[in-house]
Amino acid sequence: LGVMIATYAYSRHLKISYFSLIDFVAPLVPIGLGAGRIGNFINGELWGRVTTMPWGMIYPRAGNLPRHPSEIYEFLGEGVVLFLLLWWYSGKKPPVKAVSGMFLLAYGCIRFFLEFFRQPDPQLGFVAFGWMTRGQELCIPMVAFGVLLLFLAYRKADK
């Protein structure tokens, strides 16, 4: 949201289309997301659910059971994979709004999936259906808005 607000203000300052600017910025956002996840890993926060996988890690503040290093999964998914996808997609010269739509769609899907490995927030637990986390809940409108932007971008491009 912060990137969207700052980009909106900057697009007004430059007197250019908001979506032209945000489409340009969107492929760079995963770099910040990935760096943030590495910071989470270094700080030993936002750890994953208990696991029996051989790469499970023991987080001192989370008890003695090995857990998924979910911050690393998120670095790879929300950082590396999302960056590569958006870099490739934006290089194909899609219509205005399409890169933003692809960012929201891909980030929402990746985040929704990776939330299955992350321990839910202790103050919230599972918030819907006995299995959905707040992060997954927030991904649903993100994915829907991404699909809408892609639809609008390509519908306008076809006319």
Image (tube, rainbow, N blue to C red):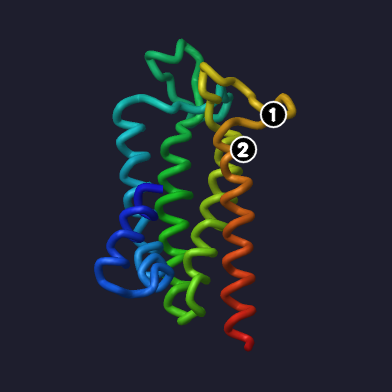
Q: Position of residue 21 (x, y in %)?
A: 36, 69
Local SS, label 1: loop
The label shown at residue 10 is none
Question: What residue did someone put label 2 on?
Answer: 137
Is 38 left, or right, of 89 in this rendering?
Answer: left
Question: What residue did someone put label 1 on?
Answer: 128
Q: Nearer the viewer, residue 122 or 119?
A: 122
Which residue extends farthest right? 129
- Crowd rating for badge 1 (residues with CA inside 10 Å; few <14, some 14–19, many 20+): few
Q: Earlier in the sequence, mark 2 or mark 1?
A: 1
Circle 2/circle 1 CB separation < 8 Å: yes
Considering only vertical position in the picture, is 97 above or below 140?
below
Q: Quadrant of residue 49?
A: top right
- Which residue is at 30% across, 31% downward? 42
- Which residue is at 30% across, 27% downward? 43
Which residue extends farthest top? 63
- Which residue is at 53% across, 31% downward? 118
Which residue extends farthest bottom? 159
Is 50 left, or right, of 44 in this rendering?
Answer: right
- Which residue is at 33% across, 75% downward? 16
- Crowd rating for badge 2 (residues with CA inside 10 Å; few <14, some 14–19, many 20+): some
Q: Nearer the viewer, residue 50 or 24?
A: 24
Q: Position of residue 61 (x, y in %)?
A: 39, 14
Check disc 2 and give the amino acid type.
Answer: Glu
Q: In what quadrant of the picture does the C terminus appear?
A: bottom right
Q: Position of residue 139 (x, y in %)?
A: 58, 45
Alpha carbon separation for disc pair 2 and 1? 8 Å
